[in-house]
Amino acid sequence: MAGGTMFGVSWQAELFDELALRLTGIGQVELVGSAADPAVITDGWSDLDVMITLTRPGQVDLLAGFDAWAVSDVRSTESQVLRIVLRDGRRLDMVVDGGVVAVPPLASDNDIRFVAAVAAAKMGRGDHLIGLHLTLELMRSCLVLAMRLRDGDAGTTVHRFGSERDALVTMSRHCSVAESRFCLVPTSWSARSSCTVAGGASWTRVTSRTGLASARCWTAGSHDRPDSSAWLMWVVGP
């Protein structure tokens, strides 16, 4: 499949070939989705959609060694739908029949990461309705986390006034939302330089390693979470 004309981006062909090689003797893989349509040229926002049929019962460790950043795993009595976001931004969607593909270890914020990856892809494709809907879901999740941090700071869930945690909301006053586009990017995708500004937040210039996005954004200060270097940023700049 490598070098086939249906792929506009080489990584999809390479990943397909890798899956086919790993399935030798235990199953087969079929290309589905947009990459299977010769009339569609894949781009940097495209994922790889495949149908996998396992001939060996039980669990198969097909993704061993893959650097998974976020995972969605939905199972029924008939099949498994496994969606993987790799740390470098590539996305793999698999429908698995005849067995189960082992799920890579999940990060503590896996669900938020996965929504962020889908939101980024939707925004990158210009689907602002779904992209912003997912962005709002992530903003709500961030606000809930900020409220929990505030509760921990104060030792109570009852608050008469705001706190320094309100910086997560008030920092948006420093940009013109009407002139901005929204996207969500995990910091692990980016090369960045930043400076700290009022409220413990920081402005950051982000350029995706895969060339998918370039934006100015802000995120909560790194002192809030030990693993914040791998967490999310709300992109609000052009």
Image (spheres, rainbow, N blue to C red):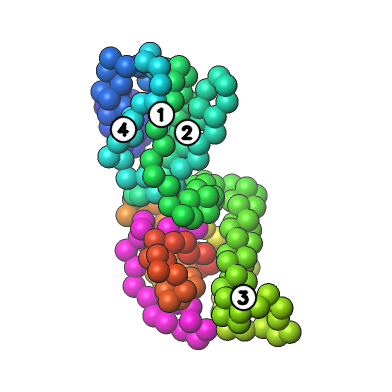
Label 4 vs 1, first from the N-terminus: 4
Q: Which amino acid type is marked by label 4?
A: Leu
Task: State the CA–CA distance, disc 3 to disc 1.
Answer: 40 Å
- Mark nearest the camera among 2 and 1 is 1
> Which residues are drawn in magenta?
184-202
Task: State the CA–CA distance, disc 4 to disc 1.
Answer: 16 Å
Q: Tell me the crowding category of disc 1: few under 14, some 14 to 19, or many 20 or more residues within 10 angstroms, Cα based.
A: many
Q: Is residue 132 above or below residue 125?
A: below
Q: Which amino acid type is marked by label 1?
A: Val
The reply to whether the C-beta atoms of the residues labelled 3 and 1 are less than 8 Å apart is no
Task: Please name the residue that numbered disc 4 is placed on.
Answer: 15
Asked whether the viewer can see residue 17, the reply is no
Q: Which amino acid type is marked by label 2?
A: Leu
- Determine the secondary structure under disc 3: helix
Residue 193, given in percent of the width and then of the height, sits at 34, 73
Q: Which picture quadrant has residue 143?
A: bottom right
Residue 150, given in percent of the width and then of the height, sits at 60, 77
Label 3 vs 4, first from the N-terminus: 4
Task: Please name the residue that numbered disc 2 is placed on.
Answer: 82
Q: Which amino acid type is marked by label 3?
A: Asp
- Mark nearest the camera among 3 and 1 is 3
Label 2 vs 3, first from the N-terminus: 2
Task: Please name the residue that numbered disc 3 is placed on.
Answer: 151
